[in-house]
Image (cartoon, rainbow, N blue to C red):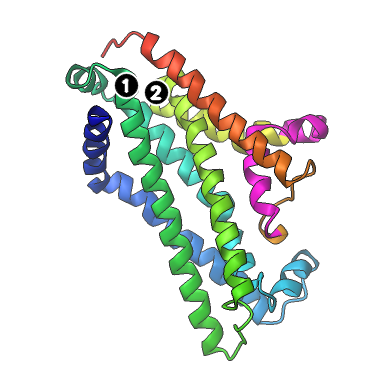
Amino acid sequence: MISVIRAFRSEVLKFRRWSVLAGAGVMLVVSTFIAYLTFHQIASGTTSPEMTDLIASFHTPQGLVSVIGQARSLIIAIALILVSANLAAEWTQGTLRNLLVREPHRLRWLAGKMLAVVLFVLLSMLLTLVISSTFILILAQGQGIQTTAWTSAEGLRIFLEFFGNEVLCLIGVSALGMLIAVLTRSVVAAVGIALAYILVLEGIIAVVVPQVSQWFPGRVFNTIVGATVPMVGPTPPQGYLAALLASVLWIVGFVVVSALVFPRQDINA
């Protein structure tokens, strides 16, 4: 346990690097901007058919989450990049050998590092949601838009459910990023394959065999959030509990495979 904590603390120190902070900064700024654009379209009286459901939910307890949740795809992509690039960089930069000299128990090192990286991703997401929510609330009050439903007990419950499901989604995405990084051992390959899988491959499979694709990791991670607020993502066709169980099983599977592969790899750099 001490070695895991040591690896965790060592990784936390790296979060002061501009490259890591830039990822969190992009998540925050772009997500808030997307939320602003969504709010502005609704508040300005748009009648776009694509926004019918959003407009209908705007003055309900789901309204705030529906607006800030429009940047979910961006948050997922950035989280995937942060995790896969951060871990794969240990091979690309040739730092893994030195790290394992200091901590020869590979799985303890990996556990400590991933705990720190996932925590950073989750805190970045939380900060993004809090700031974008505050920004939208200020805009709404400035324009005389009623926000009582958003800040009601029901609105708070919806926000917390949304946040809880988003946490599970990002943990799943992080576990996927970890596995890809362990298998590829290259920043370029890890990031490229991870994004291609989530953004392209699963989409193609969904068109060809939708009944099968609904059980794929990217789909179940995404749909468990949509189960709470349908306006921020698709709802799970297999039901929330089934999608939740599938998400947990995928996360366990990614962790187990990574734990089996990583200790057996040759460290050449």
Quarter in which the C terminus is drawn:
top left
Q: Identify the residue under disc 2.
A: 186
**Which residue is drawn at the image coordinates 66% and 34% (left, top)?**
246
**Is most of the magenta stretch helix, strand or loop?**
helix
What numbered label is drawn on residue 63? none
**Residue 61 screen position, x and y as percent:** 66, 74
**Which residue is drawn at the image coordinates 45% and 66% (left, top)?**
130
Q: Is residue 200 visible?
A: no
**Residue 258 screen position, x and y as percent:** 46, 21
Residue type at tag 2: Ser
What numbered label is drawn on residue 91? 1
From the viewer's side, name the closer residue of 81 and 100: 100
Picture layout, residue 22 above or below residue 106: below
Q: In this view, does 18 lie to the left or right of 218?
A: left
From the viewer's side, name the closer residue of 260 and 44: 260
Name the quadrant containing residue 182: top left
Mark 2 neighbour density, 10 Å: few (under 14) some (14–19) many (20 or more): many
**Residue 156 screen position, x and y as percent:** 57, 70
Q: Earlier in the sequence, mark 1 or mark 2?
A: 1
Element type where label 2 sits in the image: loop
Q: Does the magenta stretch include residue 207?
A: yes
The part of the chain drawn in magenta is 204-229
Q: Does the magenta stretch include residue 156?
A: no
- CA–CA distance between discs 1 and 2? 6 Å
